[in-house]
Image: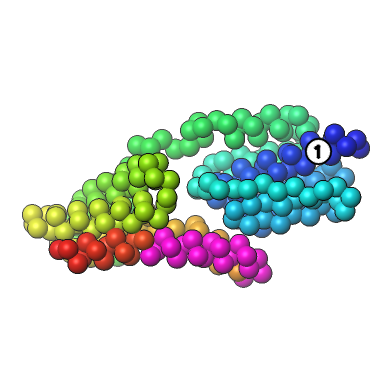
């Protein structure tokens, strides 16, 4: 196996690892995928160390380790599934290095092709908000105010996150908006219980996947990634709670 082939294989592993990590895959899954791909090319001793913000990868003791930094993260399980499919095809011998790299590059540079459209995300968040308000023992009179508050709150989150690129502030202001809308609805006699409307509306902002991955990583002994994800989830929860608390203090 030539050195150029090794370099191409390392770049391929780092590319698929970065795509998966950026789109919400668990760190153990990223590590497992990278080492399986390397093993399929005869590199049984490959080592990987993945944190939520970076990937370290080495295929042998004589090859230098490489690092990829991951600064932008979101949740897109469609991309994770596509990358997983490519990984299985590589390990099954159904894709060459060049073919796999071409498919992964298409996923990585496709922009919004593999993303759900914004109106679909907003509609889903709005409907989920109403359903959550009912699930938390709200009244059917709370369903529509929760749908509207949750949908508008989600729009605020998406727009502010694009504008400031600081997730904490976007989540804080979105929660403040939700709380304000809930109290406004109640002041006009629309809705039955303010707390049920707010609880249902903020649920699309709650980092459920992040919390689940943090607990799973901690239980599996991946302490660095588990604590990092736990800290990120705590900041998000603090931002949501802070925004709602300010709305309560104002009204």
Give the main secondary structure of the magenta stretch: helix
Left or right, 21 with reference to 141: right
Quarter that holds the N terminus = top right
**Is residue 204 or residue 158 the one in the foreground?**
158
Up/down of 110 relative to 234, above or below:
above
Q: Can residue 53 be seen at all in this image of the molecule?
A: yes
Q: Nearer the viewer, residue 92 or 112?
A: 112
Where's residue 174, x and y in %?
31, 52
Q: Residue at x 41, y 35 (%)?
A: 117
Q: Is residue 237 above or below residue 118?
A: below
Residue at x 67% of width, y 55% of height: 50
| Lateral position of residue 78 relative to residue 48, left or right | left
Q: Position of residue 193 (x, y in %)?
A: 18, 64
Q: Quadrant of residue 79?
A: top right
The quadrant of the picture occupied by the C terminus is: bottom left
In this rendering, is residue 171 above or below 23? below
Q: Mark 1 packing: few (<14 Cα in 10 Å), some, or many (20+)?
A: few
């Amino acid at each position: 196996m030539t050195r150029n082939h090794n370099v191409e294989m390392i770049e391929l592993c780092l590319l698929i690892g970065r795509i998966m990590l950026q789109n919400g895959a668990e760190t153990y899954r990223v590590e497992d995928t990278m080492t399986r791909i390397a093993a399929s090319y005869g590199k049984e001793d490959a080592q990987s160390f993945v944190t939520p913000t970076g990937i370290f990868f080495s295929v042998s003791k004589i090859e230098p380790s490489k690092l990829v930094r991951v600064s932008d993260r979101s949740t897109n399980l469609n991309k994770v599934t596509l990358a997983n499919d490519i990984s299985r095809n590589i390990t099954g011998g159904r894709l060459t290095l060049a073919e796999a790299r071409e498919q992964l590059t298409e996923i990585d540079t496709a922009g919004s092709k593999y993303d759900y459209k914004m109106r679909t995300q907003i509609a889903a968040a709005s409907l989920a908000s109403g359903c959550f308000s009912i699930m938390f023992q709200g009244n059917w009179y709370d369903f529509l105010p929760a749908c509207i508050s949750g949908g508008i709150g989600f729009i605020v989150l998406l727009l502010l996150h694009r504008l400031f690129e600081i997730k904490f502030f976007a989540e804080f202001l979105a929660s403040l908006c939700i709380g304000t809308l809930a109290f406004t609805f109640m002041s006009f006699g629309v809705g039955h219980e303010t707390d049920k409307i707010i609880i249902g509306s903020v649920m699309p902002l709650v980092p459920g996947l992040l919390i689940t991955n943090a607990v799973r990583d901690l239980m599996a002994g991946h302490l660095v990634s588990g604590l990092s994800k736990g800290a990120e989830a705590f900041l998000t929860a603090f931002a949501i709670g802070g925004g709602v608390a300010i709305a309560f203090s104002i009204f």
